[in-house]
Image (tube, grey):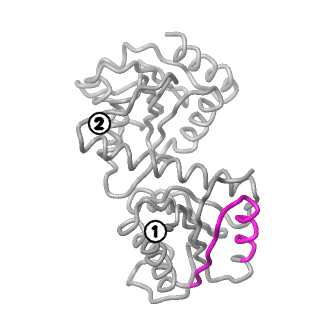
């Protein structure tokens, strides 16, 4: 499957891997350049911008070693920071071998604006194509969303059912991703902060997305409400009178919820119990509620 007119810079210090990436990307219809160091990568990005042929995507080796390292900052992270500070229109995909933890990926997302992550040992054309499409879509969504927020406007309404998924990252990020993917397979437009990210304006984007989405889906399990982020998101959804459908996980019931006074209305919302053995049934019920109400 070809990707339309996508210019990609490959930033990696392994020549063999760079060649694999170049051939793979070209087979997808991408135009590519290779850089083996931070200095060269910065120069190529600046030169492309000056010539008015900017890159749309950068793939970055998370742990490459060619360059001068800032104290306490791996070179891949350093490259990501440079791009997001100077060329935020470039969607960034971090690529690494084994040993990278979910917390590291989430930190890169929250602090520096990473759009996507891929494992080198799981790389194939389908994953690469999907990563580029998703990364560029997220980058465009977040940038347009931020501009709309600054102008005091909202996105144009769409005919698709739209939901915002709220979750405790420490407890439920895997479940949140699975639920988001399941809803997308049913044609529902889902905002999940694990996917839709940008640098330096996380709180603004979250508030904007809750405002523009029709449904608000909090994933609740014991300990979820220890997250101040989740509490703030629920409070905003209640204030905006969003259609709220709680998903109760890990045998939690509505009567077990320890809610602050401002969130007490959540107890009176119709909830769906999400159990692993009845996952498909719960998702179908959620889809029905979102599309029939």
Residue at horizontal 37 percent and vertical 33 percent from the top: 155
Residue 288 in the image: x percent, y percent?
58, 14
- Identify the mark at residue 154; answer none if there is no mark: none
Outermost residue, front direction?
A: 51
Question: Does 254 lie within the magenta span?
Answer: no
- Say which label, 2 or 1, has the lower sequence index: 1
- CA distance for labels 2 and 1: 42 Å
Picture quadrant of residue 187:
top right
Specify few, some or many for label 2: CA neighbours under 10 Å numbering under 14, 14-19, or 20 or more: some
The vertical placement of 174 against 255, above or below, is below
Residue 46 in the image: x percent, y percent?
43, 76
Pointers 2 and 1 in contact (C-beta within 8 Å): no
- Identify the mark at residue 232; answer none if there is no mark: 2
Picture quadrant of residue 157:
top left
Q: Residue 272 vs residue 129: left or right?
A: left
Residue at horizontal 51 percent and vertical 41 percent from the top: 172
Residue at horizontal 62 percent and vertical 83 percent from the top: 13
Residue 152 in the image: x percent, y percent?
23, 37
Span highlighted in magenta in the image = 19-36
The vertical placement of 65 against 126, above or below, is below
Residue 186 in the image: x percent, y percent?
64, 26
**Residue at disc 1, secondary structure:** loop
- Badge count: 2
In the image, 72 versus 255, the foreground residue is: 72
Specify few, some or many for label 1: CA neighbours under 10 Å numbering under 14, 14-19, or 20 or more: few
**Residue at disc 2, secondary structure:** helix
Q: Residue 69 vs residue 185: left or right?
A: left
Picture quadrant of residue 257:
top left
Q: Which residue is disc 1 drawn over?
A: 52
Question: Does 23 lie within the magenta span?
Answer: yes
């Amino acid at each position: 499957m070809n990707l339309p007119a996508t210019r990609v810079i490959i930033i990696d210090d392994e020549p063999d891997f760079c060649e694999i990436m170049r051939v793979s990307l070209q087979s997808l219809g991408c135009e590519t350049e290779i850089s083996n160091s931070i200095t060269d990568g910065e120069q190529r990005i600046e030169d492309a911008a000056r010539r008015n042929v900017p890159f749309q995507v950068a793939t970055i080796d998370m742990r490459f070693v060619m360059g001068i390292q800032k104290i306490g900052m791996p070179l891949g992270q350093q490259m990501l920071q440079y791009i997001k500070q100077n060329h935020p229109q470039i969607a960034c995909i971090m690529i690494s071998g084994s040993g990278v933890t979910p917390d590291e990926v989430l930190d890169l997302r929250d602090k520096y604006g990473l759009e996507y992550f891929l494992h080198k040992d799981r790389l194939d054309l389908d994953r690469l194509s999907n990563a580029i499409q998703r990364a560029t879509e997220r980058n465009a969504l977040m940038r347009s969303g931020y501009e709309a927020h600054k102008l005091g406007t909202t996105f144009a309404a769409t005919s698709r059912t739209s939901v915002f998924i709220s979750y405790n990252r420490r407890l439920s990020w895997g479940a949140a991703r699975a639920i988001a993917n399941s809803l997308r397979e049913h044609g529902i437009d889902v905002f999940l902060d694990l996917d839709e990210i940008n640098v330096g304006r996380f709180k603004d984007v979250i508030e904007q997305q809750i405002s523009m989405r029709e449904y608000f889906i909090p994933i609740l399990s014991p300990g979820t409400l220890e997250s101040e982020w989740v509490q703030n998101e629920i409070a905003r959804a209640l204030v905006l009178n969003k259609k709220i459908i709680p998903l109760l996980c890990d045998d939690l019931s509505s009567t077990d919820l320890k809610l602050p006074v401002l969130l007490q209305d959540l107890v009176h919302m119709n909830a769906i119990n999400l159990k692993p053995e009845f996952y498909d049934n719960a998702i179908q019920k959620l889809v029905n509620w979102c599309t029939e109400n």
